[in-house]
Image (tube, rainbow, N blue to C red):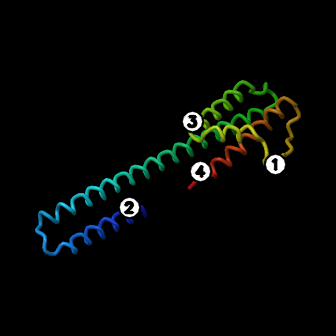
Amino acid sequence: MINVAINVLILTTATLGVCLSMKREGLRSKLNYIVPFVVLGLATLTLTELRSYRTQSRSRTVLEGLGSLISDGRQLQLRCADESSPPPQQEVNRWKSKAETFLRVHLGDMYVSRFRNPAGVPTIATTIQSNPHAKLWFTIYLRLAKLDEFFKENVK
């Protein structure tokens, strides 16, 4: 919105400057100078607004996608904590693959690398007794911490 105001101010100033400097010329001559300024200003305003809309739309898509992945991961984490049923290894693999595809498409390969790297995530203890359940739960925990980090980075 600030860009639009700046562009309008520049357009108005330029147009007034041209008009004031052309005291003796006729209307037709003045229009030959003014019309290109107006057209260029309107084109700039339109492109600025379009860019702003695209950025907001992309940001909303990224935040909604990350939110969905976080929600799905938390559900899988709850299933891992249920030791009375087998650990959902295949579902977790599909979730990780879906997350990596989303990150690659919307944020780039650097985010996929960061998603896979547990550096900086504090370790915690769990009360899950079954080793396969606990390992899978912790794998999700690490990935969720990274997705939370990405979400915070993309909130503007």
Where is residue 143, by image quadrant? top right
Which circle marks residue 4 in the picture? 2
Which circle marks residue 154 in the picture? 4
Q: Nearer the viewer, mark 1 or mark 4?
A: 4
Q: Amino acid at mark 2?
A: Val
Q: Amino acid at mark 4?
A: Asn
What kind of element bears circle 3? helix
Residue 137 on image: x %, y %: 79, 36
Q: Nearer the viewer, mark 1 or mark 2?
A: 2
- Which quarter shows the N terminus? bottom left
Residue 49 placement, left or right of 23: right
Residue 25 on image: x %, y %: 13, 70
The residue located at (71%, 44%) in the rendering is: 146
> What is the distance, in whole Å, between disc 2 and disc 3 at their CAs?
30 Å
Q: Amino acid at mark 1?
A: Pro
Q: Residues within 10 Å of mark 2 (few under 14, many from 20)?
A: some
Q: Nearer the viewer, mark 3 or mark 1?
A: 3
Marks 1 and 4, the one that precedes in the sequence: 1
Marks 4 and 3, the one that precedes in the sequence: 3
What kind of element bears circle 4? helix
The residue located at (66%, 29%) in the rendering is: 97
> What is the distance, in whole Å, between disc 4 and disc 3 at their CAs?
15 Å
Marks 3 and 1, the one that precedes in the sequence: 3
- Which quarter shows the C terminus? bottom right
Which circle marks residue 122 in the picture? 1
Considering only vertical position in the picture, is 89 above or below 118? above
The residue located at (83%, 33%) in the rendering is: 135
Marks 4 and 2, the one that precedes in the sequence: 2
Considering only vertical position in the picture, is 110 above or below 90? below
| Closest to the observer, 86 or 72 | 72
Marks 2 and 3, the one that precedes in the sequence: 2
